[in-house]
Amino acid sequence: MSSTKAQPNSIANETMSLEAKVMRLYNEFGQRKPIGQPAEDTRHPHYFLHRTFLGEQDLLIIFNTKRCRYQCYFCDLPLKSTRAWVTTEDILAQFEYVLDELKHSLSVLDRLTLSNEGSVLDIDTFPEDAMLTIARCAKELRRIRTLVLETRLEFVDPIYIKQVKEADPRATINILTGFETRDPYIRDEILYKQESLDMFLGGLDKVGESGADLTAYVLYKPSPNMTDKDAFIEAEDSINYLVEQCRRRGIPLTVRLNPMYAARRSRWAKIARTTPEYKPPRLSDVLRLAVKKASEGVKIYVGLSTEGLEEPWGNYIVREDYSQELLKQAILFNSGKRSDFSSL
């Protein structure tokens, strides 16, 4: 009786082939999954990812809906989306598609983050019945305790938020929004945010009335004219302002500190390209500020994604301080797995 043994070269080739497959799968479906491409089918979302987020298991879904009604100078995201209305049926089909793809992860999810690269609370782009159906479905995902809703604050309606809470009574509602900067000139003229500080604060009142938590983006170096020193001072001032305004209203706050990048087709990128003194932020400065504010009790993390839309010259990775080790430090900071950043 004879046995056939695989030859060493054959085993090595099979191993290499398997390694290549694993690498491809990780790049296509893991944390490196491309985020910048639009979905062509309105029954598929633009993007989704099961990720570890601040120590929790989060499912992020970027729905494919009618585009954001605003065209901020620094943002290229609305151009991915259609100008046409996307029906409740198609949006719920997107949600079902994601759950089918991630069916083996459903029992471990702690959070559900809903985005459409605009405002999911804007009923002119994201139907109310779709939102309430998704919230009721989230109730059946037994571990989920947080629903994160990305929106401009003008669309926060305490009555609507109450309906969402009633659809999923176990979940805390977290409003995710862009604050960007407290500097009125930068908000109005450079970013073209079309949301004055007074408008933002009015929306913040509604967040407080709703009993929701808040996660707010602050942009680090939002003006192409800023020096590195000016950027640190301005970002810290914006964070301090936001912290104080939320404290007055009793709103639990998380700050996402985003290094500004030049989005390819944005007007902001065109301005930066023609600004001789422009340099993207230094990630070491961003991390140093995040560490400082965390030591003062601010719940904060660093936004490291450029959403697959950045110009190669307009991203923190081109600065002289950047390294894989620095990126690793930022990731460890975000995960809470490291507390000593004295070398920064």
Image (cartoon, rainbow, N blue to C red):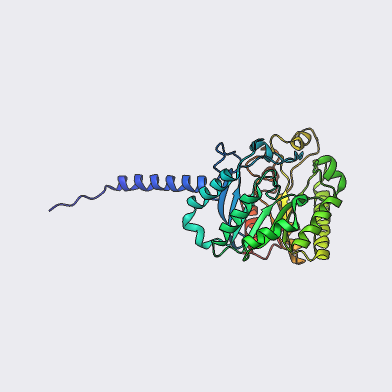
Residue in the foreground of this view, choosing between 9 and 199:
199
- Look at the image and tell me whether residue 40 can be seen: yes
> Can you give x and y, in whole percent of width and height, for residue 25 in the image?
47, 47
Q: Residue at x 75, y 67 (%)?
A: 297
Task: In the rendered view, tell whether residue 104 sits above or below residue 47.
Answer: below
Residue 191 figure quarter: top right
> Can you give x and y, in whole percent of width and height, for residue 80 in the image?
64, 37
Residue in the foreground of this view, choosing between 201 and 139:
139
Residue in the foreground of this view, choosing between 258 and 172:
172
How many numbered marks appear?
A: 0
- Quadrant of the rendering where the C terminus is positioned: bottom right
- Look at the image and tell me whether residue 54 can be seen: no
Q: Residue at x 81, y 64 (%)?
A: 249
Residue in the foreground of this view, choosing between 188 and 294:
188
> Can you give x and y, in whole percent of width and height, for residue 67 in the image?
68, 40
> Can you give x and y, in whole percent of width and height, for residue 278 in the image?
78, 39
Task: In the rendered view, tell whether residue 204 sits above or below residue 11.
Answer: below
